[in-house]
Image (tube, grey):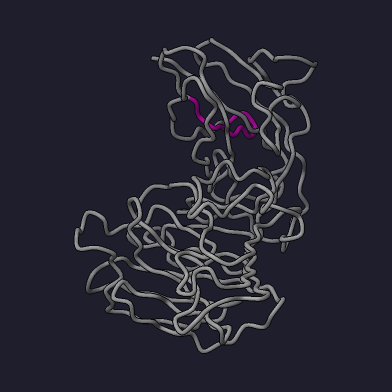
Amino acid sequence: MSDGILFFDGFEGDTTASVWQGIDGGFLQTDMIDPQWARTGGYGYGFVGGGTGGAQSCLWTPTDYIIIGFAFLWHGQGGGTQGDPIMQLRGPGDVVHVGLNFNTQNVFGFLKPDGNMLWSVRTLDVDAWYYIELRAKIHNTTGSVELWINGGADIAVTGLDTAGGGDPNSWFVNQFHVGRLGGYLAGQGPTHYQYDDFYVMNANVTPTPLGDSEVLGYALQDDASVMFSRSSGSKNYQLVDDTTPDEDATYVYSDVDNAEDYYVVGDTSYLGTIHAVQLVIRCRKTATQIWTIQGAIELTGTKSYGIQRYMAYPNYETLQPYVFGDAPGSTGWTVGQFNAMTVGFRIQTP
């Protein structure tokens, strides 16, 4: 179990990155989510080229103490004295609290809001995957930054100003950006960075990094219990399991209050710890009446529901992911519980 996980992504279930909020500088295109960039599974995110730009994660519940982990590989980087900002922890809007830079010496460093750098002591080899974890406390005097590389402690500094901006109401993190973010050598290159297997965790809940982590995607395999009607075909699960969203080409629908659909998920033989299960839902409503939707998991008759989210009209929206740190009626997850669960959603109207 890992209470406090806010988001994770290995790009396995959404090759268009629709769960992400957008881009910086117009550089992330859907073809950047591609098998050639993957560390594990079928897909990873690759950033190639000069200039600036990158990807903005989805938003999550704000926290002033954050851990983020991700797999990283470089091949042909740019850099400079202070390096390329390749990861930024951000608060509301464009407020940058802590930036993680990568320089021409192939070394990571933290860019603080005051413009000073804190450098790692480890040089990263070209074309090698590393698992990077950083933990940051956001505060103007008692902030801290820590870095782990492949599980080994690297940078650890406390008593810092890590708050971007003077308003204490903005001293939180609710998103991160990756890519080449406002590089000091903007327009020069080439730059080639790859990312995979992200996780984000509220360190106020669980302060210990997870270590090298893998994000796996599992397809739906059958209907379990369904109340929704379908646009075509004989099975509901076939119409909602879209790696690339196809909108109204295939879908299920209902106007019944408390209608629920549940589907069988493919089994896993994973030998590591299952920290959490995440569901991603893309939906819309077709009238101006208020409707909400909840991601849901059922295990041996016990159900767990995620937070109610209001559905958009008239266009489709990919909602903030639903993260379940515990199996229904249990603490944590076992392989047996994962293989026995069914997943789905419930809609409601006031």
| Residue 131: quadrant of the picture | bottom right
Looking at the picture, tell me which residue is in the foreground, 18 or 12: 18
In x, y percent, where is residue 96? 35, 62
Q: In this picture, which residue range is highlighted in magenta?
A: 293-302
As displayed, is residue 211 above or below residue 198? below
Q: Relative to residue 314, is residue 339 drawn left or right?
A: right
User: At 57% across and 31% down in the image, what residue appears?
Assistant: 282
How many marks the image carries: the answer is 0
- The secondary structure that most of the magenta stretch takes on is strand
Is 45 contained in the magenta span? no
Q: Relative to residue 241, is residue 189 drawn left or right?
A: left
For the C terminus, the quadrant is top left
Residue 337 appears anywhere in the view: no
In x, y percent, where is residue 189? 60, 73
Q: Looking at this view, name the residue that lies furthest to the bottom.
A: 121
Q: Looking at this view, name the residue that lies furthest to the left.
A: 167
